[in-house]
Image: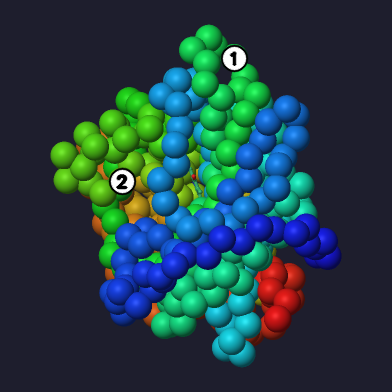
Amino acid sequence: MAVMTAPIHIERVKTSRRASIDFNNLGFGNYISDHMSLTEYSNGSWGETKIVPYGDLTLSPAMLALHYGQAIFEGMKAFKNKDGQIIIFRPQRHLQRMNKSLERMCMPLLSEELFMSSLTTLLEVDADWIPTNEGSSLYLRPFMFASEAKLGVKISDEYKFIILTSPVGPYFSKAVKVKVEEEFVRAAEGGTGFVKCAGNYGGAFYPTMLAQKQGFDQVLWTDSKEHKYIDESGAMNVMFVLNGKLVTPKLLSSLLDGVTRDSILTMSESMGIQKEERRVSVAEIEEGFKNGTLTEAFGVGTAAVVSPIASISIHGRNYELPPVGPDSFQLRAKKKLNDIRMGYEADVHGWNYILPK
Ligand SMILES: *Cc1c(COP(=O)(O)O)cnc(C)c1O
């Protein structure tokens, strides 16, 4: 991926906050690094990218994103590998998805040059913020929103593209209890489920909150027509080991095309497991519990990588999965992904974008 670097204006913080943060106790999303990248769109084109101190913005309360929801984001990660190089995991794939989100929401697309030069310059400036502890990373949050001030319903003519970064610790993935959702839907086919728009999250909060009041951690979303087929779990794609095969719902316009999902499916070919991307019915999952052929269920996404599922409630009946053993597919997949990023295993798929020194 050759990237022409446009000149980027850099305004550095006077005093870094880096030293005040306990890198052994980061959690997820609690701290934002010293700088952010900011690029503004108006009159049909993108202006110059600036790297500026992270801080508040002045925005109009009439800005269109707040009223009509043109707001999208991405979530990806940067690491320092075993040789001390800075790598970004599959940035091009994230950019492709970001552009799909932008297209669906009638927002201006980003060129590879703008996206990569903003990212790499920001990472160079805040390189000290990339954690080096095992399992830690710098979470990258590129996002865009409509900033034009106007109350009439319209597609905005002005946007801001910002990248924030946040050092994050190993995600403590305690096995989660999920409930098959049979009343609410996250997304319908033909809607915006396949894009990372802010509204998808806003709409998911209420059913998730109700599920949490009933003692679950997350919901397992089902198709909007019949609630018969599994879509996703919370904000992660979902995978099962059923009859010894890796089974995951095939992509529809109601599902998010996860980069972690794609990576794990790709790796599965060399991990001695057959994969199936197809519609997955709630009935066959229930059957798999009853006859013991369902041995693993887990969520996959950038934040946690792999999140084991402890139990699934189906039509009000709770089914437990066996504990996750060290030889489980999900833990082997998580380790393999980590080894590829860290440089312990060859990056045969070309997933690591290594920052030039
Ligand atoms: C971001 C996201 C995922 C996971 O995608 P990754 O690219 O693997 O992080 C899955 N489902 C939804 C709804 C998401 O927003």
Task: Pinpoint residue 248: horizontal percent, then vertical percent.
Answer: 54, 51
Mark yes or no: residue 294 visible: no
Q: In this view, does 316 lie to the left or right of 357?
A: left
Task: Pinpoint residue 197: horizontal percent, then vertical percent.
Answer: 52, 35
Residue most toward the bottom? 83
Quick one: 342 or 225, which is closer to the camera? 342
Name which quarter of the figure residue 175 lies in: bottom left
Q: What residue sits right under mark 1 in the picture?
A: 154
Q: Which of marks 1 and 2 is nearer the N terminus?
A: 1
Point out the image quarter for the N terminus: bottom right
Amino acid at pointer 2: Gln
Task: Pinpoint residue 210: horizontal percent, then vertical percent.
Answer: 22, 34
The disc placed on residue 218 is: 2
Residue most toward the front? 14
Q: Is 231 drawn above or below residue 23 in the view shown?
A: above
Q: Residue at x 68, y 31 (%)?
A: 42
Q: Residues within 10 Å of mark 1 (few under 14, many from 20)?
A: few
Point out the image quarter for the C terminus: bottom right
Q: Is mark 1 within 8 Å of ligand 1?
A: no
Amino acid at pointer 1: Lys
Q: In this view, does 87 lie to the left or right of 300?
A: right
Q: Residue at x 73, y 51 (%)?
A: 114
Residue most toward the top? 152
Q: Residue at x 42, y 82 (%)?
A: 133
Q: Is 231 drawn above or below residue 178 in the view shown?
A: above
Quick one: 163 or 251, which is closer to the camera? 163
Q: Which residue is drawn at 75% across and 35% down?
A: 45
* Protein image colouring: rainbow
